[in-house]
Structure formats: structure tokens, C-alpha cells
Image (tube, rainbow, N blue to C red):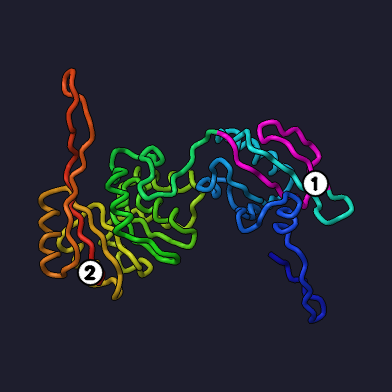
Amino acid sequence: MKNLIIVSGYVFQSPSTFSIVASRMGWAIQDTLCFGLHAVPFESICRYLAPNVRMILLLKDGENVLKLAEWLTLKNFGRSDFVVMESLGFKNEKIRRTIASEIDFIDINHPVSVAISILGNGETIPLSSGKPDNLFKNDGQITKQPIRALTMSALAPKPFEHLWDIGSGSGSIAIEWLLSHNTNTVSAVEFKSSRVEQIKLNATKLGLNNLIVYEDKIENILEKLSKPDVVFIGGGLTVNLLKDVWNIIPKNTRIVVNSVTLETGSILINAHKKYGGELYKFDVSKVGNLGKNRTWSKSYPIIQWIKSK
């Protein structure tokens, strides 16, 4: 990775800070995560925190270095190797190695970067679809993990795609969509204010900012939303809503709808008959107690319709 310096019309290459740090550490830069955290929260790297991950971070100043070490410690990654590098490439270059939870430097000067080898037993976010339910603050209105994994597979996110998450609830689908790629964006629509706050809290917890949350009924704002590449309806389905969404979305837009009631299920059966696509019914059971014994405890079956316009 190179920086370009332009002087009087001439262009000169110079090594980037990331390249210099990787060289000092003896790390292959293609296997190292590189982030500039000057103007974004530490939470933006949450999804990458896992043992043995190597990352290089550019920070605003020495105070932020100390705050980062404290933040990692609170996340139970305080055992991480923590190498502070100041004024790289200059005469006053300084490199100091420590452990995140034990840092005691008081004279860290700008420009500064940190090379970190993540160690510890903090929460690691799986790469698979269907993140753990406890990752999302919710009031019970959440697409549960197994169904969410199936739903994300149906939504099939690709880079630079925009999702409408209608009836967003806790925002778990929207959050997983954003976690799938950092270029993806979401318009989440939820009319209940307490759930709107949940969605925002869940996004903030993970440092996700490509999300706009609308506190309103979808019928009121349908024409105000940026055109989608994919639509998910997880709640509030009606015949008129499905018709309005279908009529307004661009050609080739993918639409996925989950239903749990007989009434909304019948809407999807009719939609499948009219528009085609794929129609599935999912029954998920898990072991529960029945007296002194165990049995299979079933949740409500889910009907899912998938169609590209």
C-alpha cells in the first residue's frame, strides 16, 4: 500500500503507515486488517474481534490509544498484544510493546498507530448467517436465530445492495445485512418507538452507521425510501401492503416475506399463485422439559415466500 505525494505536478510514491507498521511487525499486510479510527467509534471493529486476528489501527492521538486499550479490556480482550508506534519513519520514531490491559504509557505522541494481535475470551461474532439471539437487544419481537439464518440465505446480500427491512422489530435482519458487507445499506421501518430505540442501540453497539431507521408505518413513507435491491417484510403484512410494495419496487428486486399467522400465510399462498417464486414452510423444534423427561418443543411454523420481480 502506497501513499502518493504530489509536488508541483510531479507524483512521488511513499510507503503508507499501514505498510510501515506491517514491515516493523513482520506481518503480511494481505493477512492483516487495516483501519483508520480517527473519526469512527471503536465499535466499528467489533465484528473483527477474534483470537489470532491481527490488525493495524491509525488513531487520532495518545489519549485514544489509552481509551482503545481500556475498551479492549472491557471487551475481555485485554490479553491482546499491543504495540504502540509513534512517528514512524522519522528520527524520533518510537515503538513500545505491551499488553492492552497493562498499558501504562503517559507520553504517547501523534502521529500514532497501534498493531494488535487479538487474544482473550471476549465475544466473537460468528461469520455465519444466524448470529446468536443475545447479540440483539429485543422485547421478544425478533426473528429467532435458526429462522434468521434461513432468511439471510434467502435475502442473499451482495456488496453495495440496499435493503428495505419492513416491520424491523429488533433490527436483527437489518443488522445481519449490514454485517455481511461494509458497503451494504438499510432502510429499517418500525412504527413502535421502543423498538426503534432497540434497532438504534443494536446498530450502535456494533458500530454500524449505514442504517436509516424510520419510525412510521410503511404505508406512510413507502415513496420516500431509497429504491431497494432487496425487500424483507417481517411484520405488518397485508394484501394492500404487498401490492403497494410490489408495484413500487424496481425490476429484479428480490423480495422475501416471513409469515407466522394463518391470515398472512394465506396472503403468501395467493402471492405465490399470482407471481410465482418459491414458497417454503419451516418447522423448528428444540428439546424442552416435560415433567421429569424431555420432549421436542415446537415453535410456530414459518411460511416464507421468495421472489424476484
What is the CA distance from the residue labelled 2 to the residue labelled 1? 57 Å
Residue in the foreground of this view, choosing between 273 and 285: 285
Instruction: Give percent across and percent down for residue 8.
Output: 82, 80
Mark 2 element type: helix
Question: Which amino acid, by three-letter code, is at mark 2?
Answer: Trp
- Which label number is shown at residue 246? 2
**What residue is shown at x 39% (from left), y 39% (from top)?**
137
Q: Position of residue 72 (x, y in %)?
A: 60, 38
What amino acid is found at the position of numbered circle 1 in the picture?
A: Asn
Residue for badge 1: 109
Residue 184 figure quarter: bottom left
Viewer-proximal residue, 123 or 242?
A: 123
Left/right of residue 216 with respect to residue 272 in the rendered view: right
**What's the residue at 76%, 51% (across, down)?**
24
Please report the bounds of the magenta region as a residue range: 94-120
The crowding category of the residue bearing disc 1, from other C-alpha atoms within 10 Å (few below 14, some 14 to 19, many at least 20), is some
Name the spot of residue 39 as percent of width and height, x first. 62, 54
* Residue found farthest to the right: 91
Q: Is residue 66 above or below residue 271?
A: above
Q: Residue at x 64, y 43 (%)?
A: 117
The answer to whether residue 77 is left or right of residue 100 is: left
**Residue situated in front as seen by the camera: 223 or 97:** 97
